Amino acid sequence: MAETKKTALLVLSGGMDSTTMLYDYRDKIAAAVNFSYGSNHNARERECARLHCARLGVEFIEIDLDFMGRYFESSLLRGADAIPDGHYADENMRSTVVPFRNGIMLSIAAGLAESRGLTEVMLANHGGDHTIYPDCRPAFIEAMNAAIEAGTFADVHLDAPYTDLTKGQIAARGAALGLDYSTTYSCYKGGEKHCGKCGTCIERREALAAAGLPDPTEYTA
């Protein structure tokens, strides 16, 4: 029987959600793209993304967006000490927003997909992102999908199947797939060990607990 042609390009950070999506939709993902934009945790996430693509035999594309680190304003681009502690729902976490980050990445991903004859771009945004990050919300996904479809000859479209899921639900899916979350990275401070106090670390802990999973992460606090 002939192998089914793979149709999708995944935006893969190396964090819990996009790595879960890589395994969840591996049968249709032909390639994954990782963007380095100057955040504290880019390098450690990229190592994880590269590892999982190698394991699954998925083409791994690395793109440098260093201009964002130079010209955009976000605590995520200003070193570990600039990252506030606290939950995502806290007002101070708004400082970690990188303006229109997903819009920029998805525009490039759409061009990559069309260049490779692929028809889907996949993004692993989820319900927990909606409070703080405007470029993760359903309205943005719908608008970006319309722009991608209108702006490509091949009718490339955006697929974001985790948009309405919680991070705990995503973690449960990953566990069912046998994914070892110790081989993913989340901490916004970018240290060798997760800080345990920033919004992403707290969310990571809560997601694993909600999924009923032991937490394999090494935290400093």
Image (spheres, rainbow, N blue to C red):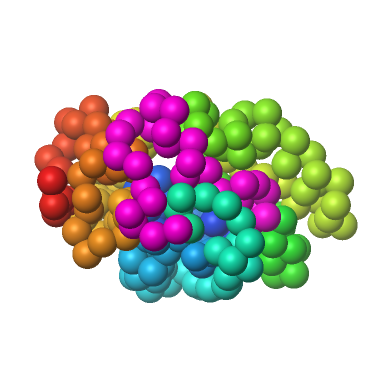
Rendered position, 33 above or below 166: below
Q: Which quarter of the figure has residue 203? A: top left
Q: Position of residue 77 (x, y in %)?
A: 48, 58
Chain part drawn in magenta: 78-106
For this rendering, which residue is in front, 204 or 197?
A: 197
Q: Position of residue 87 (x, y in %)?
A: 33, 31
Question: Left of 170 or right of it: where is 59?
Answer: right
Q: Position of residue 196 (x, y in %)?
A: 20, 44
For this rendering, which residue is in front, 83 or 205?
A: 83
Residue drawn at x 34%, y 57% as measured from the top left: 80
Q: Position of residue 95 (x, y in %)?
A: 48, 41
Residue drawn at x 13%, y 52% as measured from the top left: 220
Rendered position, 195 above or below 207: below
Q: Is residue 146 magenta?
A: no
Question: Left of 3 or right of it: where is 110?
Answer: right
Q: Which quarter of the figure has residue 64? A: bottom right
Q: Is residue 99 magenta?
A: yes
Rendered position, 79 above or below 124: below
Question: Left of 194 or right of it: where is 92?
Answer: right
For this rendering, which residue is in front, 164 or 71?
A: 71
Residue drawn at x 62%, y 47% as measured from the top left: 99
Task: Count numbered badges in the picture.
Answer: 0
Q: Residue furthest front?
A: 81
Q: Which quarter of the figure has residue 45? A: bottom left
Res 176 visible:
no
Residue drawn at x 47%, y 44% as measured from the top left: 96
